[in-house]
Image (cartoon, coloured by chain):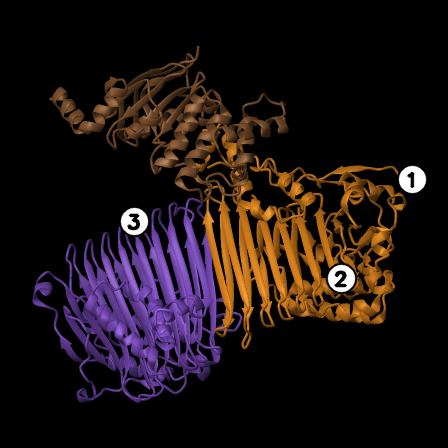
Chain colours: A orange, B purple, C brown
Amino acid sequence: MKPLTEIDGAPAPASPVVGIDQTAGNFSYKVDYAFDAGTGLSEDTIRYISSVKKEAPWILEFRLKALKTFWDKPMPTHWATKDLENIDFQKIRYYLSQGQKPKRTWDEVPDDIKKTFERLGIPEQERKFLAGVEAQFDSEAAYSNIKDIVAKQGVIFVNSTEGLREHPEIFKKFFGKVIPTGDNKFSALNSAVFSGGSFIYVPPGVKVAQPLQAYFRINAENFGQFERTLIIADEGSEVVYMEGCTAPKFSTSTLHSAVVELVALKGAKIQYITVQNWANNVFNLVTKRGVAHEDAEIKWIDCNIGSRLTMKYPGVVLKGERARGEVLSIALANDGQHQDTGAKMVHAANNTTSNIIAKSISVGQGRSTYRGVVHIPKHLKGCKNNTECDALLINTNSRTDTYPAISVRGDRNATQHEASVSKVSEDMIFYMQSRGLTEAQAMSLAVNGFINDLARQFPMEYSVELKRLIDLEMEGSVG
Amino acid sequence: MASLTSHSATTVGAFTAEVFAAHLARVQHLPAWWLDRKRTAYARFAALPFPKRTDEGWRFSHLSGLSLDGYQLAAPINHQQVTKQDLGAPGAGTLLLANHQVVYAEPLAAKFAQQGVIFTTLQEALLKHSDLVRPHLLAQPSKLGSEKFVALHEAFLENGAFIYVPRNVTVDLPLGVFHYASGTGTALFPHTLVVAEENAKVTIADFFRSSTGAGAQFACGGNDLYAGHGAQVTYLAMQDWSRETLSFQFNATVARRDTRVLSINLHAGARQARHESFSQLQAPGAHSEMLALTIAHGTQEFDQRTLQIHQAPNTSSNLLYKNALLDQAKTIFSGLIVVDPDAQKTDAYQSNRNLMLSDEAEANSLPGLEIQANDVRCTHGATSARIDAEQEFYLESRGINPTQAQELLVFGFFEEVLGKIENSQLHDSLAEIIREKFKA
Amino acid sequence: MSLLEIKNLHISIGDKAIVKGFNLTIKPGEVHAIMGPNGTGKSTLAKAIAGHPSYTITGGDVILDGKSILAMQPDERARSGLFLAFQYPSEIPGVSIANFLRAAVQARMAEGEELDASGYYKKLYSKMDLLKIDRKFTSRAVNDGFSGGEKKRCEILQMAMLEPHFALMDETDSGLDIDALRIVADGVNTLRSGPLGILLITHYQRLLDYIVPDFVHVMYDGRIVKSGNKSLALELEAKGYDWVKQEFAAANA
């Protein structure tokens, strides 16, 4: 057994939000990688990834085509932040792993990797309340397992590498259909270099009682993680998927660019929950979209606390009649962070409904941005959208932006959008102080109250986790 | 000037360097500083590219409808062709410009003239009151996407109206300005400049109309509203160009300390109409109210872009844009509230309401906020819906027939904007025009 | 022994002097009513004593149990035993009454000491029963969307839970109809039996029919101009405030 070397990440800057634990993931152990695609991006990088994964020729072809699309597409800086220009694609390592086959028991996971997940509490959570766990370490899943009882129902829960190899007939049918390669520059990049992520198939009528969870861990410096997740809920089935992520903080930037595709067939329900707590040197540029067929429901619960820049707008294409789409999002932007998040609802059938509730908190010089698209095309009827965006600004120099776009055709649909910006009022703070709470406690209560109605929508275990994360201690940030 | 002719026809359309030279020849008696600015503006217009599909400021716009081909400069017209236009209310003066020429005027009432109020054509103002015109005429930046067309407006601006109200003077009756475009293919560049000095108060009604059967025209107009310390300016615009016209209207409002600027824009005409409205709240106590009401018929497109910039603490703005959409009409509302880092205690509101009256109509709404101060109250809302069925039922249950009930509710929808016109006669007359436009 | 002494207190908002030399001592168990016309500084007095940042104390002192509280933060004052029942209580969306009160009770405990949850709820429910408040009330967000009467009852519930030594009740009767007023007054009277000292600020005599004061003071132009017992309140009710103003004007002439 190799000796374990602990490497502490770069010290996190003094944060005005002391209670937020961005440092929980700020550690790393030295790991020897058996597979390394080296630094920089070229066709060779892609051939390397494809060959170590022993992929079918069509996948390599798909990847190479995507690389070309990626190079051809400009950075979307005509609407997005110029900070994107600071990503140097030739300084990133695109593939690092110890092997391509995940272990089915924690005992088999090599110590140097297992230790990380133990420190993050993943095996413990699995025992307590999860139906299955996939733990990705840099480019590949180190561990992937599903409880027998769930597997016996015919549920498939493997990583995308295995999914492609063992279930190509299902995978190929849906892969890249919800989010085409050329959807945006980063979906193209992911399509070229993707590795890891989950592949889930829930057979008709099966309701998975406990959540399935994926945990994404970045360990190496200058690394890019590009997982690819595909979830298919067959007719009348139900599944809850949760993902968490952390990385040690490095002084150089890290890139995380995932593509997540969901397909909810007739009457199916998918709930996808994210608690994103990347270190604040991570560029988190993620494309997430689902297709909801007749009477199906897709609900994104998206919580962004970490990263340097997050650009993520989970979407639902409401393809079948009476389909429902929902995005509930919470963003917290601290000093040096820009949470550029939102939602996209494309109505494509009659009587479809969508609901977006976005709450953001900007602290210090943090910046939170909401971007939304709601599209109701011609000749539809009975479609409804409701959008609410509320921003809370804690300090005088905090910033928030709201950029929705709502297109409606015809007189048989209805949309409403409301947004507000507020601060925690001095009177509210005084009121709470006059009951004996300190200014910091009062601020913490007010901020938690601001997101409370959304936080309640999280499953119990995550809601507790979230409360802990946003248990703001506002010492020094009360202005 | 030779270099300018090299631009392709698609970039400058009918407005070639030769046409610009012909225009300059018509205004060569105006001050040199102004002619210099026009030359610079023309060069800028010719050099700037056409809007592209990826330009954020042109999202959802019908770009191929913006072609500048096939227009010519307004020709002098026969006075008899123009019927006297009616303000619909007793006024302090009227000015009727047809193809840039004054064809009718009711001079400013003597009691106002005696107090130093100026109400004249822009050409005369450039000649006689250059010092009052120069600091305010097209002095604000173009920030909403139409830099090219604003430059075109400046280059070809030939005439318009100038209103100056000195310190502490109240003009308690409205001033009426009529811009009239005659002849098929006519390109018109109207402009209204309002300068209200400290504690002045004034109301202007600005009308834009085409001659009967005029066909396609090109109207590229603007207005500058300057409200000095404590001033109150009410500006009403009624855009009623021919239904084949391509129209641009650019507004720039500057609100100084403790001002109240109310701008009400009524849109009924044009094939494709782009309206950009830009309010700068520059000093504490400034308040700008930006209202618009659009009746969109047929295949008309109304493209409205607004910007409320709060540059000082304790400023407020309130925007309400209402659209009633019929047939295959399309509207775009894109608004942005910007609160600068120092502008604490800003109170800004922005609302876009689309009343969908047809299954073929399309409403696009992009209400935006950029907030960099925390002690503010900023909200925006956007809704698109048909007439409320409950309200309809309520009216019908009182014995009103469905057609009438609908009409009542639609007029009720308009009234939220029209009701802000304080002068009741002006209100009634504009409400009547709007109702007729709606029924047409 | 617990004592609240207000000594020659001067309070300003910005440059404007509002309270100009206010003197009053409250002993445990006493109810003092402060009456007076609008704009005379009654609410300013209550908020400034509680430590509201908009008010500046320009002179005098407020002494609680022998110690000046003027240098204390509002929360320290509260933890020292002071309670302000607000005229216009703040709405706190998303924070339930139960959680809010729990945080306030916890704040009064020593560092490291943990609140006993079952004991807390037992106490909360018994106080609610005492004040005839429905149990469902505790899951609502503090004052959020409450009626005037509900807000005032929420104030009294907090007072009951936090067990202050001295309560400053600012226009507790404003905006209440007779039924709501009776419920609130019953609540206050229930708490009155102990050592609690109360400063009752009101514009109208009618509250004093329900909460009978030991002392009545008339405040005008920032200070007490007349003191007496319950009968003074009745006199004011009958004659209005004009005679106070005239007397004051005559005295200052």
Query: Does A359 sit above or below residue C57?
Result: below
Instruction: Residue at 44% x, 34% y: name it.
Output: C153
The amino acid marked with disc number 2 is Val
Q: Is residue A475 visible?
A: no
In primary-sequence order, the first of circles 1 and 2 is 1
Q: Chain of mark 1?
A: A
Q: Chain of mark 2?
A: A
Q: Secondary structure at mark 1?
A: loop
What residue is disc 1 on?
A: A1
Give the left or right position of residue B143, taking residue B222 as reference: right
Mark 1 neighbour density, 10 Å: few (under 14) some (14–19) many (20 or more): few
- Distance, label 1 to label 3, CA atoms, is 73 Å
Query: Does C46 sit above or below residue B230?
Result: above
Residue B285 circle label? 3
**Mark 1 and mark 3 residues within 8 Å of each other at the beta carbon:** no
Give the left or right position of residue B53, taking residue B139 as reference: right
What residue is disc 2 on?
A: A193
Query: In which quadrant is the C terminus of chain C drawn?
Result: top left
- Distance, label 3 to label 2, CA atoms, is 56 Å
